[in-house]
Image: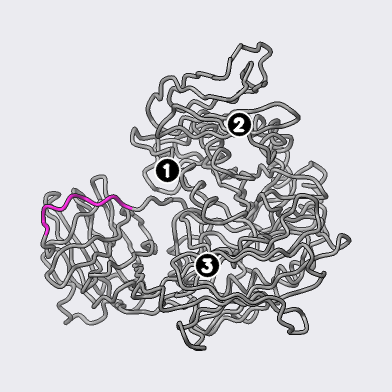
Amino acid sequence: MPTPSPESARPDQPDPTPTPYNLTRRGFVTAGAAAAAGVLMTVSFGHNAAVAAPDTDALTTDALTVEPDDLAPITIYSTSFEDATDPTWISNSTAYDSSASHTGANSLRYSRTDPASYTVPSVAVAAAPAQQITASVFIKASELTGAGGATLAIEAYSAAGGWLGGRYTKGIRPTEWTRLELDTFDVPANAARISTLLYLERGTTGTVSFDDLTVLRLPPRLLQPVLARPPYRGTLLPVPGEDQRIQVQVQLQPLDGATAQHVVQIDMFDAAGGLVDSRVYPGAPMLEHSYDAARLPHGRYQLRVRALAAGTSNVEQERQFTITKLRRRDVPKSYVDGHGRLIRNGKPFFPIGIYDGTRGSSRAKIIQNLNDIRGSFNAVMDYNPPSRDTLDRAHERGISYIYSIKDFFYNSIQPEKPDAIRTEADEVPYIEQTVRQFRDHPALLAWYVNDELPVDKFGRQLVAHQNAVVANDPHHPTYAVDYIVRPAYLQLRTADLIGMDDYPIRGEAGDTIGSVGRLVGQEVQLYPNRGQWSVIQLHNLGNYGQRGLRPPTLAEVRNMSWQAIAAGATGLLYYSRFDLERDASGVPYRTLLDNAKSVVNEIGRLSDVILSTDRLADVTTTGGPGLMWTTRVHRGTGFLVAVNAANTNLGEVTFTVPGLRKARQSGEGRWQTANGALTVALPPLAVLIYELKR
């Protein structure tokens, strides 16, 4: 992890903690092949689609109104190191290099032979309060030694030169040009300048090339509304138990922090433009609007949310949401209910899926893959869009498909991108055609619309893709995966279901397995009433050259799975079947697959319990950090799930359950007397599931 640069006024500043991230990419196309073709390749962490940055035309949608440049970042610094006379990046470790480049003629070569040396070249730009900054650079390494890699960072400094904080990420060691991107950095209010740093991590020697550095400022967003209810496509569903309120959560974030200088006006109009409801709220960092729609007539409505300068009619920003109140006969065959559960043909459905990649595979191989997972996994997400024959074969085996359209970008270089998509204008028509072609197939479960592309950079395309699916298929939700928790007011405009893919297992003593539940829990809290289909690691990070020593063990896979469930997951997908066939540490495919099936078989048996919306009331515990737990009530029986999400022994933990008479571990025959409390031992990686009787 990096320390502040030599220019810092605090040279003794300890290494800041880097932002957690995934280090997996699919590898179906090489960065070298992309570079040879003259195409920009973006490799973010996780199993992300590779997509070049879009242009910045205004985004227009049907269901959502977005102002010009609303989602367009602003470039505040960029260089491809073409000016060999520019002294900015020259140090005792760096030089301009014409023998290697990602684009143009030059790159910046950084070499180090002494592991004790630590040179950090940087460039500074002026800062403004409340800015959000991100940066990316292309990296190619050669013969690196030591535990670290090549990376970049952003740091903020005061006018007096004091270090105020920064954004860091672990280094990488790619042998082909690979894009490394930082998470967004919130600039401190008292920052005067921002420095972007390129360097080899401490103790690492060798040579690395940097090229195409870009520093972006995300535009300020005063108004940040989220439609909390109805959560699924703004649809009020005439279904027993579904909430009939319209709720909007609004954050105001003015640059100067003075929320009192603004007001929020929320108006609702019917299809004819008639005003149905209007409210004005004084400015506050967070406010909530609620409207009882139980007696609202069926039809379509527009909900308009505006930020205005206080005491004026000056509209500063605006968002619109479409609200539709359905008749009973119009309820979709599949939808996501107010608890985040997929309701399929009238019944809650818990997807237990697995990722696959069958591009270039024979029909026999695809069928063999389906046979390998049948009876355990009930869904598959194949990066290669399936044929109708593949969908037929899956349906015969009781397996549903999450159909991938995540590579339907004109600027994607993934091999799954359709050849017919040559410009951005081709994307939506092709998506609409695909959706209409497969929307009625009984094996279709959902549409996979995004794989880790940040909405603040690809918002125009992502929202357009979401709207194309919504307009052509009311019966199947969309699903997007990301490795960080994005702002809700942006992320929820692009998909119906969200999945967190956190891959913490390398096989090292310091593996932070508890990050899985923590991040899922953050999304469940931040994305109100939405479904969360979490992605669980099966693969060895070493398959992707990222220092993984082994794949997760059976106990680790089980632990991560139940962490996600305890945190609120309403579905699980596992990454990935094809990685089990090529484990870098040599563990046999069947061993890894059987481990995974053992875990998902247990979850499948308890899926009705997991999907229950009833909880045991007033349960308390003596457990502290590292304990994750949840309860359910199903058919009169209580259930307690307790997970040790720490790397240490949590010892004995007591749960107090009012009225508890007896308890037993799920699936066992013998009940034990409880007398209002249950004490359990939680060694490392423990997952305990108890049935409770009161």
Question: Does residue 601 sit above or below 182 in this rendering?
Answer: above
Residue 589 location, quadrant = top right
Question: What is the x, y in percent for residue 309?
Answer: 45, 83
Earlier-in-chain disc, 3 versus 2 = 3
Q: Nearer the viewer, residue 459 or 403?
A: 459
Q: Which residues are magenta?
A: 10-18
Disc 2 or disc 1, which is closer to the eye?
2
For the residues marked 2 and 1, what is the alpha-carbon distance in whole angstroms?
Answer: 23 Å
For the residues marked 3 and 1, what is the alpha-carbon distance in whole angstroms?
Answer: 43 Å
Disc 1, SS: helix
Q: Is residue 16 magenta?
A: yes
The residue beneath circle 2 is 599
Earlier-in-chain disc, 3 versus 1 = 3
Is 404 placed left or right of 124 in the picture?
A: right
Say which mark, if any, is on residue 16.
Answer: none
Question: What is the x, y in percent for residue 72?
Answer: 46, 78
* Disc 1: CA contacts within 10 A as few (<14), some (14-19) or many (>=20): some
Question: Which secondary structure dominates the residues rendered in magenta?
Answer: loop
The residue beneath circle 3 is 250
Q: Nearer the viewer, residue 494 or 354?
A: 494
Q: Nearer the viewer, residue 1 or 173?
A: 1
Disc 3, SS: strand
Q: Is residue 643 magenta?
A: no
The residue beneath circle 1 is 542
Question: What is the x, y in percent for residue 673?
Answer: 61, 11
Looking at the image, which residue is at 20% across and 69% down? 122
Question: Does residue 312 sit above or below 32 in this rendering?
Answer: below
Residue 398 visible (yes or no): yes
* Disc 2: CA contacts within 10 A as few (<14), some (14-19) or many (>=20): some
